[in-house]
Image: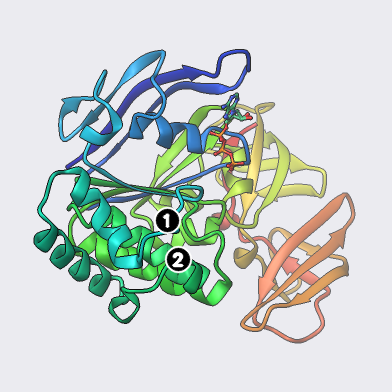
Amino acid sequence: MSVVVDSLAFRYPAAGAGLDGVSLDVAPGEFCAVIGPSGCGKSTLLKLIAGFLSPAAGQIRIAGTDMTGVPPRLRNLGIVFQNYALFPHMTALENVAYPLKLRGIGRAERLNRAGQALERTRLSGLADRHPRQLSGGQQQRVALARALVFAPGALLLDEPLSALDAAHRAAMRDEIRAVQREHGIATLHVTHDQEEALSIADKVAVMRDGALLQLASPQELYDRPADRFVAGFVGHANLFDATVCGPDLVETSIGPLACTTEGRPIGTAVTLLARPEAVRTDPPDGAVNRFTGTLVRDRFLGSLRRYDLAVPGGTILGETLSRGDIRSVQIPPDCLRILPA
Ligand SMILES: Nc1ncnc2c1ncn2[C@@H]1O[C@H](COP(=O)(O)OP(=O)(O)OP(=O)(O)O)[C@@H](O)[C@H]1O
C-alpha cells in the first residue's frame, strides 16, 4: 500500500501552528524518515495520516483511496507512537493480540498470530510477561509487534526509539527496517535523530514551520540540500555568505573562493556549502582556496577528528583522520556547492 499526502493543510484551533500545503508520497515497501526542529509539525503530519486529526485542506490517499472521513481504525495502519502505551493489565501476547480482537478474529487464531508477531520481534520467550516486567526496549518491541500483527498496509512510527539507549536504539532500528522491508510495508518514521534518518531511510522529508522543505534520498539531501537550512540541519556544514565576483569566483568573509558559479552574474548573493570531510589538511603552498589559521577546537571522535580552524574573517570546520598539527587547509573548488542566499 502506498501513502500519498497531497497539499495537506491543518491549523490547531486557537494556535497559529499547523501544516501548510505538505505533499509527499511513500511507495509500498519504502521507508520515509521525517525530520525537522521541535514543533515543526512532524507529529501533526502523522496524526493527520492516522486520522486522529482532520485536515483543513488537501487529501490523504492510502492504497489509492481517499481517506477523507475514514475513521482511524479503518485505515489499516500500524501505529507506534511514543505515548501510545501498552495495556498494563495484559501480557505481551495479549497486548499484541488485541488489534485482532478488535477486528473480530477468534481467540485461537489471534493468539497464534500474536505469537508469530512476537517471534518476528524476537520476544517469544517473554510472551507471558506484563509490560512492567519488560525493559523499555522490550516494551517497544511489543508495541512494534502489536502494530505489525494485523499485516497493516503502512506503518506510522513517531519517535519509537527515543526511550532507548544508543546500543538498543541502533539494534531496534535495524530490526524495524528488516521487518518493514521483509513485508514491503510503506513506513513513515518521525525522528529527532538525523543520523538515524540518514542511515535507515530510503528517503527523508525535512520539515520546518509546518512546511516540507525537501523530500529526497539521504545522499541527495546531504550532497544537494535545497537550501541553507537543510544543509545545516542534515550533517555538519561550513556555510558562507558569498557574492559572485567573477567567473567561478566568489567573495566571502574569509576571502575569495574559487568554485563553480554556474554562470551566475557578478553581484549575485549566494550561500556556499562545504562539508567538513571535504576540507583537506596540509595542502601544498600555492594551492587554490588555501587558508592558514589557528586551531580553536579539536575534538577526537575515535574514527575521526573534527576541528575548527580560525582564519582571518571566520572559521573553517574540518574533519580528518590525521593526528598531526593542523595549520593550513584547503577547500577544494569542486567540493563547494552553491545554494540560494
Ligand atoms: N493539541 C494542540 N493544540 C495546539 N497546538 C498544538 C497541539 N499539538 C501541537 N501543537 C503545536 O503545533 C506545532 C507542531 O507540533 P508537532 O507536535 O506536530 O511538532 P513536532 O515537529 O512533532 O515536534 P517535536 O519534535 O517537538 O515532537 C507546535 O508548534 C505545537 O506547539
Residue 217 visible in the snapshot: yes
Q: Secondary structure at mark 2?
A: helix
> Disc 1 and disc 2: Cα gap in Å?
7 Å
Residue under label 2, please give it: 131
Above/below status of 187 relative to 322: above
Instruction: Identify the coloring.
Output: rainbow
Residue at 43%, 63% in the rendered image: 140
Residue under label 1, please give it: 86
Q: Residues within 10 Å of mark 1 (few under 14, many from 20)?
A: some
Q: Position of residue 225 (x, y in %)?
A: 51, 44
Comparing 295 with 150, the one in front is 150
Above/below status of 213 relative to 195: above
Comparing 174 with 233, the one in front is 174
Q: Secondary structure at mark 1?
A: loop
Residue 286 visible in the snapshot: no
Q: Amino acid at mark 2?
A: Pro
Left or right for 61, reference 269 = left
Comparing 198 with 337, the one in front is 198
Left or right for 92, reference 322 = left
